[in-house]
Image (spheres, grey):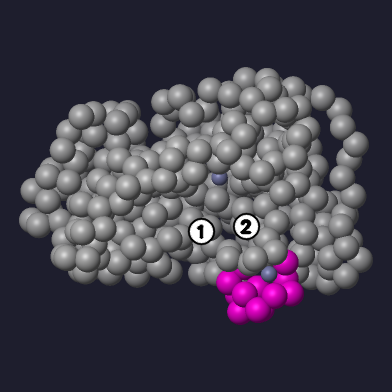
Amino acid sequence: MVVDSVRALPRVREVAEPTAPSGGVVLRVTATGVCRSDWHAWAGHDEVVFPHVPGHELAGVVVEVGAGAARWRPGDRVTVPFVCGCGRCEWCRAGEAQVCPDQQQPGFTHWGSFAEYVALHAADTNLVRIPDGVDSTAAAALGCRFATAYRALVGRARVGEGEWVTVVGAGGVGLSAVMVARSLGARVVAVDRNPGALAVAAGLGAEHTVHADGADVPAAVLDLTGGGSHVAVDAVGSEQTCADSILSLRRRGRHVQVGLLPPVDGHPRVPMARVIGWELDLLGSHGMAAADYPAMMALVERGSLQPQRLVARTIGLEEAAALLPVFDRATVAGMTVVDPAR
Ligand SMILES: [Zn+2]
Ligand SMILES: [Zn+2]
């Protein structure tokens, strides 16, 4: 699926097959999720070189191994974080590839996975083996939104049992956060403008839902939680949702910013007076390194986490090409996964 220029209608057509970079691999794509980040790239909010192939939430089978990639063989079933580290810098060597200064992102820095084949760099650092008991769709659902939610709550906010977690935005990353928070024994308040998304959040274990359509979200959350939540996640990325998340916290609470706040929308005003006065922690979270996947993947294999429950539909590339330009306005609940062979 090729996008020829900013905001051009995506077209499905034959292009040259990728070759494995040094240290990398080529995968045959078996499943790839559609994400709001793909829409941002399509809309020109990222530094993307056109013509471009989007797609960054993928699972597939190794078909070609480049020189210097030691851990992988053709036939291996793998997934990959959307942030791929260089494999050489101090951050990658410490297992923190999600902040690698020399990172690659399939579907952004090079052609991505809305295709039959995709090339991936630094395979020994970035590839994650998919256990036999986990299918491609579940694995593709992990790469961006689920892993991001897992790291936001486990690695960054360190959510504890019995704590209140407010999740602002019940899209893919928000619903993932609901599931992860529940698996940690936390109590969840989900906030969204879409009643259908809130119903899904409730089905995944959100104890309360707040319909954000003009409501005073912080007041509602403070009321429901007896003074505010311990942790709040902005899973949307707007000035309003960021402020709602921060102002929904109790004193000493932790806010995690996961939704992107692209500069094109202007510099967001953040309620810093509250941050100072109530000693709130503001945490950024950016995907999750492959090194941190095994603990999450074990929970998926055991069934304690079920990312496949977030997948609402599987479509082909032609349908995905029609969906991408309107994805910012799509009010679909749950994740959409593309099967390029469909
Ligand atoms: Zn994504
Ligand atoms: Zn690196």
Q: What residue type is labelled 1?
A: His
The image quadrant where one finds the C terminus is: top right
Residue at the location (32% across, 47% down)? 269
Which of 138 and 19 lies nearest the eye of the viewer?
A: 19
What range of the chain is rendered magenta? 86-97
Could you say whether the residue bearing mark 2 is in a helix, strand or loop?
loop
Could you say whether the residue bearing mark 1 is in a helix, strand or loop?
loop
Mark 1 Cα-neighbour bin, 10 Å: few <14, some 14–19, many ≥20 = some
Q: In this view, does 115 lie above or below 230?
A: above
Residue 286 — which label? 1
Q: Can you give x and y, in whole percent of width and height, for residue 63 in the image?
A: 85, 51
Q: What residue type is labelled 2?
A: Val
Residue 304 in view in this figure: no
Residue 83 — which label? 2
Q: Can you give x and y, in whole percent of width and height, for residue 333 in the image?
A: 41, 31
Measure how far apart labels 2 and 1 are at the Cα level: 8 Å
Q: Is residue 80 magenta?
A: no
The image quarter in which residue 278 lies: bottom left
Residue at the location (54% across, 62% down)? 288
Contact, mark 2 vs mark 1 (Cβ under 8 Å): yes
Q: Can you give x and y, in whole percent of width and height, for residue 284 in the image?
A: 43, 61
